[in-house]
Image (spheres, rainbow, N blue to C red):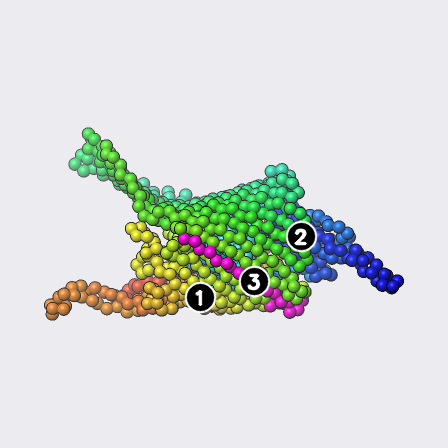
Amino acid sequence: MRLYLVLIFTFICSFALAQSHTISGYISDAKTGERLIGANVYEPSLKNGTTTNTYGFYSITLTVKDSVRLLVSYVGYQSQIVRLLLQKDEVLDLNLQPSVTLNEVLITSSRSEQIQDRTQMSRIDLPMEKLKSIPMFMGETDILKAIQLLPGVQSGGEGSSGLYVRGGGPDQNLILLDGAPVYNVSHLFGFFSVFNSDAIKNVTLYTGGFPARYGGRLSSVIDITMKEGNMKKMSGSAGIGLVASRLMLEGPIKKDKGSFIVSARRTYIDLLLSPLIKLASDGEATTGYYFWDINAKANYILSPKDRIYLSLYGGRDRFYASTFYKYQSAGTEYSERNNFGIKWGNVTATTRWNHQFNKKLFANTSLLFSDFRFIIKADLNEATNDGFSKTTNSYILKYLSGINDQSIKTDFDYYAGSKHLLRFGAGYIYHTFTTGTIQYNYTQTNSASFDTSFGSKPVYSHEFYSYIEDDWQLSSLIKINPGIRWSGNVVQGKFFQMPEPRISVRYLLTEHSSIKASFVMMQQYLHLLSNSNIGLPTDLWVPATARIKPQRSWQPALGYSHSFKKNDQDFEFTTEVYYKEMHNLIDYLGGANFINTAESWENKVDAGKGWSYGVEFFLQKKTGRLSGWIGYTLSYSRRRFPNINFNETFPYKYDRRHDIEIVLERKVNDKFSLGITWVFGTGNAITLPIAQYNAPQNPYALANGLESYYSNTIEYYGGKNAFRMKPYHRLDLGLNWSGGKHKRKDQLNISFYNAYSRLNPYFYYIGYDRYGNKQVRSLSLFPIIPSISYSISF
């Protein structure tokens, strides 16, 4: 009996000594006060860890008898080891110092969370500092161009910022800027993206295995987070390049309590070319193009558990041309002025409130606004003056399309224990689609004006969703992330809804390798009608309607992840195989386009299905003087529509069999680095005529035996997308220098786009040889393009 009591007492004492306690807090940059996203907090002896969320918050529950040792790490920052006696719940806010040299990010004392530890697959985090070292078109750092250099992601064409992920279209990418969707991501007709790298803190790409908190698109999620601003002191940067200049300022609203950041960018192509065009036309004509964008963000800490954010983005592209003619005849003066312009752009706004309910429950509530508009405007002004009276006529024609979103959402992170991280939330989106409206106005001197609008009327829809997911560690080897998202949409009196189950599984083979699997179902309540090959803003955003069903997809994937060291350098390797099936895709019927608004767009399209499958390989060297990655994708993508190509299966335009990307950065010393990018891709699938014949212009004359001297040339195209463009490949080189005195930092970049001047075909057309015979010819846009840019930070 005494022995029994001793055992019970010993058990009670052991239980009392080994209790569970929670450590929670925020991890920030020590120099700026910015919260760090995805920082690792790991307890090596217990093999238990977590990462900070989008707002730098973490919570970890540990069962220990006495002390713990936490390893805190983040790429590009010096790691910290924190030891504490864990006898109660602790609030621990940590500040990490940026690394002075690359080797300082190496973790030699213990192991932090590696890629094989994550449940999530088909995810890549892109550090901004690495992106800035990649050689880019015209020397402009471009987030979307960098994403095109990853496996499973393809570009739309030479210089284009369009993204085609695992066989999907550009409308199937959910691109978020501080939580707000951005619908048109292109400047300069697709050659630059709208995201200014000076304002961006973090970029995360998902190509599959989507967590339940993301939805509304079928192919990818690109989650972009803006910088918060320096909470410690005023600072900024400025840069000038061949096509654009930029300026960024940031600083505290109140030191360690609030901060702001403002970043702006503008091209000056119009300022350089307009005077030359005026001079060449004797002042009778002018034309130009420019774009600008501005990012602004402010945040303030209301209390240790409350913080508010306000984010704004605005950007515009504008192309304009005008002519003026003036002459006299028989004593009467005539003049005519013609103006033509195209402009398009986005506006987004996000208001967020972070609230920490307790040590385990974190919430974020957001109000979101997003607006995209595309406008074509042409006006003609005529004037006649005979010396006695003056008559004027004015004609104005305006085309408008776009999409507007207003939404609210609430997301919760609940750190239930050492084995569960629950995420759940709900949201509502109010969509307004302007699917092509033409306004016409005519005004004459001393006469009533004529004003009318015709075309498609705006369409309104209501989208709502809720979700729950759990990152759940079943054992030391198995970790799963099951989740379900339910979404619905009300449009034109029609109600669509669908449960969207998701699951990701990780099985740890060894300490450094794992296999992963995922399955997702997705539904999308909007479509994009594309008229162009390079993502021009003439594309129309249209909703699912009573006649056009929402897009749906399902995608399983299987992968292998492995991290290893070689010569004290960190490497990561992943490979994934996937299959994706998509339903209710739409495309224009033959001959249809966006200009004709006499009939509804619903009568111009056909609905069909698509599927894609492939395998991806990704090898990344993360540390050392030489860093970068090699990616390879083998893929197939097909489409089929009942009323297109005679209901026969055809290759998707961006069905590329092989895609290779090599991205390397070599640090020569503390001041110089060399960037190298080489890409190779199978040519796009296009449709070209394969034969032609002459048909009589007068069938009646031919039927009655009469001569027919005139004939029509008819071309036969064969199958849709049955022709392949030449393979695409290109080498880019960049030399980066950094220096400066005192607190100022100078950076100089010299880059060569298409360094060996490969004449990659931009598009094909039917031309003639010197003998007058028809032949297929190609047009190439870019030979080697050198560029230079200079920036300072202060």
774 on left or right of 251: left
Q: Is residue 306 visible?
A: yes
**Residue occupying image coordinates x 68% and y 54%:** 60
Callout 2 amino acid: Ser
Q: Main secondary structure of the magenta part?
A: strand
Between 334 and 143, the one nearer to me in the picture = 143
Contact check, label 2 and label 3, Cβ < 8 Å = no
What amino acid is labelled 3 in the image?
Answer: Ile
Decide which of tag 2 and tag 3 comes sooner along the chain: 2
Residue 446 among those drawn in magenta:
no
Is residue 150 something one can see in this rendering?
Answer: no
Residues marked 1 and 2 touching at CB (< 8 Å):
no
Of the 4 image quadrants, the one containing the C terminus is: top right
The residue that appears at 49% across and 67% down in the rendered structure is 579
Residue 68 is situated, as x and y percent measured from the top left of the image, at: 75, 56
Question: For the residue carrying disc 2, how many other residues have a C-alpha within 10 Å: few (<14), some (14-19), or many (20+)?
Answer: many
Q: Is residue 504 magenta?
A: yes
> Closer to the camera, 413 or 269?
413
Residue 611 - label: 1
Instruction: Tell me the tag on residue 503.
Output: 3
Instruction: Locate the N terminus and report the quarter of the image it occupies.
Output: bottom right
The numbered dot on residue 59 is 2
Instruction: Estimate the spatial distance between the alpha carbons at disc 1 and disc 2, rounded to whole Å.
Output: 41 Å
Kind of residue sitting beneath label 1? Trp
Magenta region, residue range: 494-515
| Alpha-carbon span between mark 1 and mark 3 | 21 Å
- Which circle's residue, 1 or 3, is located before the other in the chain? 3
Give the mark toward the camera: 2 or 3: 3
Disc 3 secondary structure class: strand
